[in-house]
Amino acid sequence: MQGYSRDTNHWMRGFGIAFKKSSGLLRQGVDGRRRSALIFDFIHEHRERFPVQLMCDTLGVSTGGYYAARARSRSPRTLRRDGLASQIRSVHAQSRQIYGSPRVHQTLLQAGTQVCRNTVAKLMKSLGIKARSHRRFRVTTTDSTHPHRLAPDHLQRRFDVAQLNRVWASDITYVPTDEGFLYLAGVMDLASRRIVGWSMSATMHAELACQAFIMAVQARRPAPGLIHHSDRGIQYACDQYQRLLRSHGAVPSMSRRGNCYDNAVSESFWGRLKTELIHHRRFATREQAKQAIFEYIEVFYNRQRLHSTLGYQSPEQFEASRR
């Protein structure tokens, strides 16, 4: 194996695994010409993982034959497959590697590419492209052991809201940084799933939640009667926050004690934020985390990310369709 680098053994081990998975296809009872074509397709499919010359030598074909085969006209089916593969890679990269096959499929359809979902799923699997995995996290930001008055649950898990600015859901989470936790409060409009208000701070005082609600009110100007749903945490039950709600004609609503499912949409958003951004980054400072979260919420989540509950539209697209 002269001419290869000192990493040859590493390449060979990896190539051996890939070859074993596809060896049944290459050993089928077909004529020599067809077998060569299958081998060349195999080499082309794995060209970004292993050196072409190494695969040609291992599989007993010439590199000249491989490149000559690639230069010849390919079938319309092969051309379409390669084109789809390129589009899929692009969509997945633009989604920050978070989209699985359903959202990649919807993005392709919206771009005018007619393709079935199964084809997209199979291609993504063959290309080794998949959505970032979800990690479970424990909610540790709710302190409900306080003397403040609690509100009843007016929402009752009715998360499908028809009109904008009729029901908002609020919650608080945390983001680890090398400087310590950064706390994040968010307010979501349940009709569009848009984050309409948010605030970040090194402390988890009531002012954090108040600033998020004030931002939402200034941006949306809701009419009196807005239902504001949250957990029973002291930040939402305290006098400061309750006065703020009353001053804007909002009706407080709170989840049952220890039941995160009563505010499941907010919890789901925090899960997306952590899966799609936080768990894949290390923040040296709180300021770095703030900048990344701002960009995620305002640039990506509100304006670009497709939501299955909104018919695979972004919150901004959904709201525009309601105007």
Image (spheres, rainbow, N blue to C red):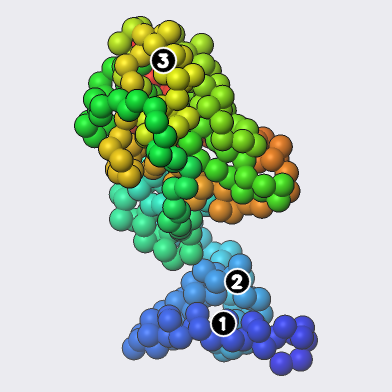
Q: Residue at x 71, y 37 (%)?
A: 287
Q: Earlier in the sequence, mark 3 or mark 2?
A: 2
Whether residue 322 is visible, yes or no, is: no
- Please tell me whether mark 3 sits on a helix, a strand or a loop: helix
Q: Residue at x 42, y 34 (%)?
A: 146
The percent position of residue 3, horizontal first and vertical second, equals: 78, 86
Q: Earlier in the sequence, mark 1 or mark 2?
A: 1
Quarter occupied by residue 207: top right
Question: To which residue does mark 3 refer?
Answer: 245
- The amino acid type of the residue labelled 1 equals Phe
Residue 176 lies left or right of residue 169; in this view the side is right
Q: Which mark is residue 195?
A: none
In space, the residues marked 3 and 2 are separated at their CA atoms by 57 Å
- The amino acid type of the residue labelled 2 equals Arg
In space, the residues marked 1 and 2 are separated at their CA atoms by 8 Å
The percent position of residue 154, horizontal first and vertical second, equals: 24, 25
Question: To which residue does mark 2 refer?
Answer: 49
Quarter in which the N terminus is drawn: bottom right
Using the image as rendered, state which of residue 126 and residue 41 is in the foreground: 126
Q: Which mark is residue 15?
A: 1
Residue 149 lies left or right of residue 199; in this view the side is left
